Amino acid sequence: MAKEKLFKGGEFLITDALPEEIFTPEDFTSEQKMIAQSAEEFGQGELDTRWEELGVLDPDLIKSLLKKAADLDFLGAEMPEIYGGAGLDKVSSSLITEHLSRGTSGFFVSYGVQTGIGSLPLVLFGSPEQKKKYLPKLASAEMIGAYALTEPQHGSDALGAETTAVLSEDGKYYVLNGQKQFISNAGFADLFITYAQVDGTQFTSFIVERQWEGVSVDAEEEKMGVHGSSTRAVIFKDVKVPVENVLGEVGRGHVVALNTLNIGRYKLGAGTVGGAKLLIAEAVKYAKGRIQFGKPICEFGLIKHKIAEMVIRTYVNESMVYRTARLLDLALEGIDPTSEEAGKKTGEALRKYALECSINKVFGSEMLDFVADECVQIMGGYGYIKGNPVETAYRDSRINRIWEGTNEINRLLIVDLLMRAGLKGELPLLDTIKKLTEELLTFRPSMETAEGVLEEERKMVSMAKKIALLSAGASVQKYMQKLAGEQEIVALIADMIIEIFAMESALLRALKKLQKEGEEKARIHVAATRAYINDAFPKVDLMARQVFAAISEGEELRTQLMGLRKLARYTPINAIALRREIAESIVPVARYHLTRI
């Protein structure tokens, strides 16, 4: 495997990485491919055949499938081996998540909670005693986990929880009182990772067993989608929680919650890749068999456009997910999972990539919504009929933009995390922006197209970074500490950052493929990358214009727009031809084929 570089979180915005410095899906090892194949076989054999059954809540069926997944080490993929897990790397666990994301909502929601937010808090922050007690049971599916954070009056503002925890007079236990809302797996969970305020102000994480007196659940919620999953309120009434079941430190529950959500966000990105690939296969299969006006609809230009765009966005998302997964692996190298400091060190390492995790969550959830919508459109009336897997996927995908922090909250977080990194000196943002501003005064854009495959796109990505940095710098200069209150501007900056990570991830992947295997084998990779970047670049330009128009006027605005025009020059390409080429490569095989496992 090539030696990738451990970039800092957010560093992609100020550094132009080289293809060999990042990980791509073409770099999967033989072992990782075997793990992916095993997960795919489980998905096809155990999940696809039960699609209709898993669309209706059946706890016994879900638990039996979780047990089968546990026997293959899928549930304990990210748990240390000494606690019954497989101790796999993040790339491998992401591959498992991708291949088990098969639109079977009853299983996948439970699996996602069990392997993510329902167990990772223990993996990351549990004491050796807590890990020894609970992780083997979660890895084997003897216990089913749940994550109880949201409250009726506190969703995005989770740290303002009203659930209370009062220490008993003898100091042996905390008495928990309160209610949690919209808790996945709640109907049949044995273990809850939950949060409460100690002494009214110390937000703290607790491990609570379902069997304890005072723990109860409300009726099942009737939801728009993910009908096969359990979602209930959880009620704590005078629940006695032993002090040894405090997770992490008293008053440090936010560390547990935020780091857990970060991992959940990037894993959600991996899940959306798997869901999108299945929908692409469904759409192409239908389009090949649907005859209208004397020929299959896959031969019509507008259907080709839809198929190609689904593939392009999936390719970009896949590139981002595995680039991020490998960054997390590199950051976690050298940490002994059995040491007392493991949780603290792991939390510190993961925190540095919270920005990338949020980017993956936002892009992936919106990508899957797009793909599901286009799949329904290709299938027309048939896609709209209840009981069709595509209709179910359309409804199921909608939740992804809400849980793990809404996409609006994640957009605000992206900019906040970037600014904090700059203020702490973790990234030289201010110096970079100052240097860019000075260079812009004498900068003269080239009027010639760059020579070489993807060289023009490489230049566009570099220019997009400058545009985003200058927009962010001007906004900070205008509002200083009050920028967070200008949420519309913050969201525009976040969207520029998301597009840049997306563009660059696809670009570096295609360049790496090109360098290793040549132009012919990289043809569709290059086409997808060119089409995406040539669509995204003018979007970045437009967003920057909107930012400048919101913060400036008169001569100052004209000067800013003049500088922007220097950076935003580009020559449009024939994206129609590129999309036809992509669609025509996909239709014969009727599946997403850009990654070979």
Image (cartoon, helix red, strand yellow):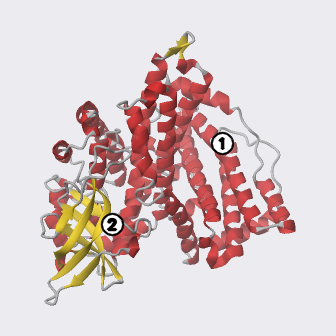
Q: Secondary structure at mark 2?
A: loop
Q: Relative to 314, is 205 on the left or the right? A: left
Give amino acid for label 1: Asp
Foreground: 336 or 143?
Answer: 143
Task: Please tell me which residue lies in front, 87 or 497.
Answer: 497
Quarter holding residue 343: bottom left
User: Hey, what amino acid is under mark 2?
Assistant: Leu
Q: Residue at x 38, y 37 (%)?
A: 392
Residue located beneath label 2 in the image:
149
First along the sequence among labels 1 and 2: 2
Q: Quarter-wise, where is residue 493 in the image?
A: bottom right
Q: Which residue is mark 1?
A: 535
Task: Measuring from the top left, give residue 446's x and y in whole percent.
Answer: 81, 49
Residue 219 at what x, y percent from top left? 24, 55
Which residue is at a point 16% across and 46% down the rendered structure image? 67
Residue 508 visible in this rendered orientation of the protein:
yes
Whether residue 591 is visible to the viewer of this picture, yes or no, is no
Circle 2 crowding by C-alpha within 10 Å: few under 14, some 14–19, many from 20: many
Q: Real-space Cα distance between discs 1 and 2?
A: 39 Å
Q: Which-is-in-front pick, marks 1 and 2? A: 2
Q: Which mark is residue 305?
A: none
- Residue 166, compared with residue 525, is above or below; it is below
Q: Nearer the viewer, residue 376 or 462?
A: 376
Residue 362: x percent and y percent? 50, 53
* Point 60% across, 66% down: residue: 487
